[in-house]
Amino acid sequence: MRILDWLTGLWNRGCPPGADARSIGLMAREVRELARAALLLGACDGDFAARLLRIQAEMEELEELAARPRFRRLPLAQRLGLRESLTQSRKRLMQTMQAAPAATQRLQ
């Protein structure tokens, strides 16, 4: 496993942290899970629920693409843009979840 880690490090040399395929795949998984959790909160209308379902499907597809060797051939600028977009999506989903009304009126 050390040789594989060494080769991966060699492949990603010069790549800023967070722009490698593994990090982008992890961020896509996190955004997908946040979208699922926001959907489970149930405080969204039909259009927003459809949007959350689309986000889940897109993040699942991105996670699969990031696992492929072809993903590493993307230009660095595109991977950095993708990372920035995922960061903004995660931030918006967190704001949506915080703004959602509580499921119960009782204080916990």
Image: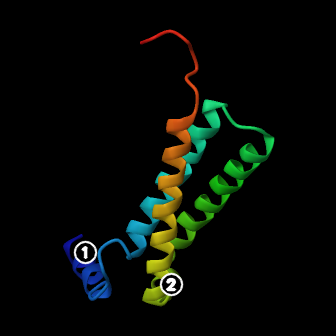
Q: Can residue 67 be seen in this view?
A: no
- Residue 58 horizontal side relative to residue 25, left or right: right
Image spot of residue 44 (x, y percent):
70, 37
Which label is found at residue 44?
Answer: none
Disc 2 crowd rating (10 Å Cα; few below 14, some 14-19, many 20+) is few
Tell me which amino acid carries mark 2.
Gln
Label 1: element kind: helix
Q: Residue at x 39, y 68 (%)?
A: 22
Q: Which residue is drawn at 60% across and 31% down?
A: 41
Image spot of residue 100 (x, y percent):
58, 33
Label 2: element kind: helix
In front of the other: 94 or 64:
94
In front of the other: 23 or 69:
23
User: In front of the other: label 2 or label 1?
Assistant: 2
Look at the image and tell me in which quarter the N terminus lies: bottom left
Q: Residue furthest top?
A: 106
In front of the other: 97 or 24:
97
Q: Which of marks 2 and 1 is nearer the N terminus?
A: 1
Tell me which amino acid carries mark 1.
Asp
Which label is found at residue 78?
Answer: 2
What distance separates the C-alpha of mark 2 from that of mark 1? 24 Å
Look at the image and tell me in which quarter the C terminus lies: top left
Image spot of residue 42 (x, y percent):
67, 31
- Residue 61 horizontal side relative to residue 31, left or right: right
Image spot of residue 71 (x, y percent):
51, 81
Which label is found at residue 5?
Answer: 1
